[in-house]
Amino acid sequence: MLTPLLWLKDYASIDGSVPEYARKMTLSGTIAEDIKYSKELSGITSAKILSMKRHESSDHLWIVALSGEGSEKTVVTGAQNISVGDIVAHGLPGAILADRDEPLESREILGITSQGMLLSATELGIPASCVPKDAEDGVFVLPKDTPLGASVPEALGLTEATIDFELTNNRQDCNSILGIAAETEACQGREFIYPEYETGFDGDEINNFLNIEIEDFSKCHRYTARMARVIKIEPSPLWMQVRLMASGIRPINNIVDVSNFVMIETGQPLHMFDYAQISEGKIIVKPARKGDAIKTLDGVQRELASQTLMISDPQKHIGIAGIMGALNSEITDSTEMIVIESANFEKTAIKAGRKFLGINSESASRFEKGLSIFLTRYACDRAAGLLMELGAVDLLDGIIDVAEPFERPSDVALKASAANSLLGTNIEIGQMAKLLSLLGIKSKIEGETLTATPPIFRQDINVAEDVIEEIARMYGYENIPTGALPFGAAETPNAYYSAKQLIKSIMAAVGGNEILTYSFLSPSTNMRLRFDDIRKDPIALRNPLGEDNSLMRTSLIHGMLEALSLNFRKKSKPALMFEIGMVYHKSDSALPDQKEMLCFGAYGFEYAYAKSVADYLFESLKISNSSVQRSSENHLHPKRSADIISSDGAKIGYIGQTHPAVLKGYDLPSPVVICEISIDFLAEQIISQQIKAVAAHRYPAIERDLAIVCDEAILAGDISREILASGGQFIKEASVFDVYKSEALGDKKSIAFALAFRSEDRTLVDEDVSAAIVNILKRLEEKFGATLRE
Amino acid sequence: MDLSIQQIQNDALKEIGKAASLRELEAAQARYLGRKGALTQILRSMGSLSETERPLAGKAANEAREAIEAAAKARKAELEFNELNRTLEEEPIDITLSGAKIPVGHTHPLYKFWNELNEIFFSLGFSVAEGPEIEFVKYNFDMLNVPASHPSREDTDTFFVDDELCLRTQTSPVQIREMLKRQPPIRIISPGKVYRRDEIDATHSPLFHQLEGLVVDKGITMASLKSTLDYIAKRLYGESTKTVFRPHQFYFTEPSAEMDASCFVCHGEGCRTCKGVGFIELLGCGMVHPNVLRACGIDPQEYSGFAFGMGIDRMAMFKYQISDLRLLFNNDLDFLSQF
């Protein structure tokens, strides 16, 4: 809420400095987001144009005689929007203007000395968009009632600051000068009383002219109208113009200005119709029919939708309710009678209409946030009174006020002890009542119970906690005590979360760089990964930020490859990257499957590196019962990839070199390795783990190397598993330490294993081991056709 | 006699001490203890001594031999050590060179900051609660008391899968899930990814991170809220940190507040980090609305609670003076390896 203090001070006073006041407002919940001070101007006085004559040697310059402060002055000006009798802002020699640093000097223009100059809006520091239309391109012509010889910055209120207050959703009542005035008084310890705007014109003459019908009260809760005969349409007086300009609104004429003035002052948007254009003197509030159209005040022809709420007469639409009037009923210079509309439209109806039409009017945005039904008549009467005061109209007797039944906000009862125990304070009940009264909330005290009656414009006080918040605001949040922390025994830590932290720290220990990627995916990217299971069919967003982000990822691959690609292109050294993140899969249950995965990857490394990283991770986590088998993941190299299988046979991840065809899409050369492992699996292993220590071995192991020759296709892992299975009771280890190929071996390979035999009871002797090795070789021969290397 | 043994020992020790090489040492040792050595001669001549003299002389000679042997052993070790050192002197290397690089891993700055924050809450006995990112609209909005017509529910603000499912816009639905699951006392933080329909720029992202907290128990007051959050700010930014609580509005809390903390860079003086204000808006908070408690089957007459929420990305950016939010999602190793 942009609040000119000039205007605010009509209703409230400000103690101390402006920043002090702003701080008080902020601390009581109305955040002063921005304070704008205008530049300090001087040497500018109002003056009347006594005479004008053309400069002899120019066809556009005027020599103007001014009467203002002191003696008559002569000024040369190029402005064309002035005439004799106009009151203008005269910058005297030495004047400080808004748009320049140096003081104004007397100048000779084509032989004539100009004593200062006539000033434009910009030179006064007013945006050109906020001044009357005829002053937009010329000098600023002041209203006729501006006193002569007065300081123009003061007369225009330019010496006052403007504060932009940020409002919370529940305080739409503060989107008005009066609402801010109420908070202003309250936060300075004074009670604010809303001014009364009764017109005294309470007869029923209006009923002879106008009839109002609301088709659906759920769309229009209340409609009030007054009528008036136009006396004179002319510019508004100075005081009204300066308040509008300070609020960023361009003054137009007395009737339009009143409409805008009342909206800013009370928060209630109004509309004025030319009565002569309303057929049969009847206004009907009803939705448009599909296919209807209307030309709005901005001159645009607009198609309407069936949900758009309209103001109509029996023959045509004369306005879009709460959003914008129609050109066909606009006030013009020939308007003789006007209808003042003040209505309360349902916020959802206005929002639907506005969204369909794509119009963002000040009026619509106010209705959308919801207005108090009590404002309707209040603002109508205020507007009528102002128009009379300005001498713009003669008001007709009476008001039309059609409304669904409504009640003032309900009383809310609370126990003082409940308030104190929610706040942690010790405020007396009488003190509570006093604090509430600052906000116009009346209290009735019966014993421990306080019954609060909210003011009519407050729609946000419905339950005891709402009242308690008001007590707390006025008491001051800073006065609520702080002290001991209120905690007992700690909660049980979340083991799953801790497991993830452990995994992350292991990945960092092995040299991994943690990355963070978006959860979105484009359809074409997902196609490229050539999944053939649930991951092929991602969950789609109804309203994505464009097609590229329209799906929820089903794996972490895309983000990883993008990160690798970026760093490859930047010529970073090959490095391990990892991420733990969620993937999203369609499911039959109400909520999609959402599982976390660990993904790691690197460019410039081959399969074996990734396998070593995975081994390191598994060994660190003491997971020993998983294995690998050839993978059929389509996005991986068909022969350099593996599925990771848990001891119960479930696939818990995969590891491998990325398929070169996939890499093409990321501008990455082979080899790139990638791995995804289920966090559920890893976490479960970590959580269920129970270390049972055994004493260190007492007897030394006997070690033997065993080099065998077998077919290329046979997996070392399968052989080592067989060695362990056939090596008797003492064999403890069979690990590969060399793989060797040569011409002599042909299409076979040699694998060297380091075996370790150990007993817990005694030191083994050669005989124990040689018997085992004979057996091992026999089994390897039978199963794999493998032989001992000669 | 004794005198001559003593003399031999003295001479031997002197010579051993002077031996400059192992060979000299061996020669010296042989001269005294060898077959023809001085002390050996003495021992051989023992037979000529009287019954009473012999044991005394024998003892003296043995002692002398032991002393000489010990000295020779010590000298030998010394000489060997010197010898070894001479070899090592011949093995100089360039001490500025390292071997194969052992790569150092890095935690993402967001998570690094996040862990720091978690630790503070863990020290107060909070536990972590997590939940799905694709969430029921019911949990993300309805049960949090957000009015049906609120703009945040619109397609322009929130990502929807369909009318029932959306990408959570806050981690508050996790609090709802937790309250539905168990009765108080509850003391949780729910950190996680959240989504809002913002285009990516220097300060906005459709995906960002929140840490929300919830405490529900008997006798929880707004004073408890202030004490706790003030403590958190001091732990995070230092003991001298000041906090200010301002009234605010959220649908799931009443009364509601925003907390500002004095800027950890300028301590309230005003600087670039805090845009000259001296304070940084840190979090939103409030007393859990009775409607929310009731919807989760918790009796607001018996229990009360407070909740709070903060944006981790923004706070991490403050902490590490990161100027552009996009850097957090860019995954550039140049950037990541600073943390």
Image (tube, coloured by chain):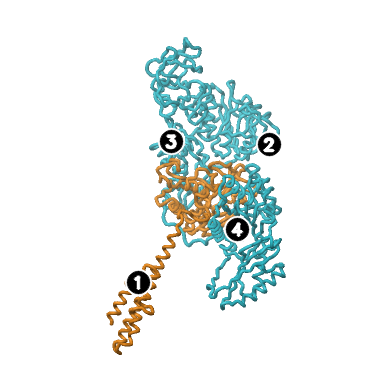
Contact between marks 3 and 2 (CB within 8 A): the answer is no
- In the picture, measured across the screen, residue A207 lies left or right of residue A243, that is right
Residue hosting label 4? A679
Residue hosting label 2? A306
Numbered label attached to residue A234:
none
Residue hosting label 3? A12
SS of the residue under disc 4: helix
* Residue located at (51% from left, 18% from top): A81
Which of label 2 and label 1 is nearer to you?
1
Q: Position of residue B125 (x, y in %)?
A: 48, 59
Which of label 1 and label 4 is nearer to you?
1
One can see residue A765 in this view: yes
Identify the image quadrant of the C terminus of chain A: bottom right
Mark 2, other Cα within 10 Å: few <14 / some 14–19 / many ≥20: some
Q: CA distance from mark 3 to mark 2?
A: 45 Å
Numbered label attached to residue B16:
1
- Identity, as a three-letter code, of the amino acid under mark 3: Ala
Specify the subunit that label 1 lies on: B
Which of label 4 and label 3 is nearer to you?
4
Q: Earlier in the sequence, mark 4 or mark 3?
A: 3
Looking at the image, which is closer to me, A514 or A294? A514
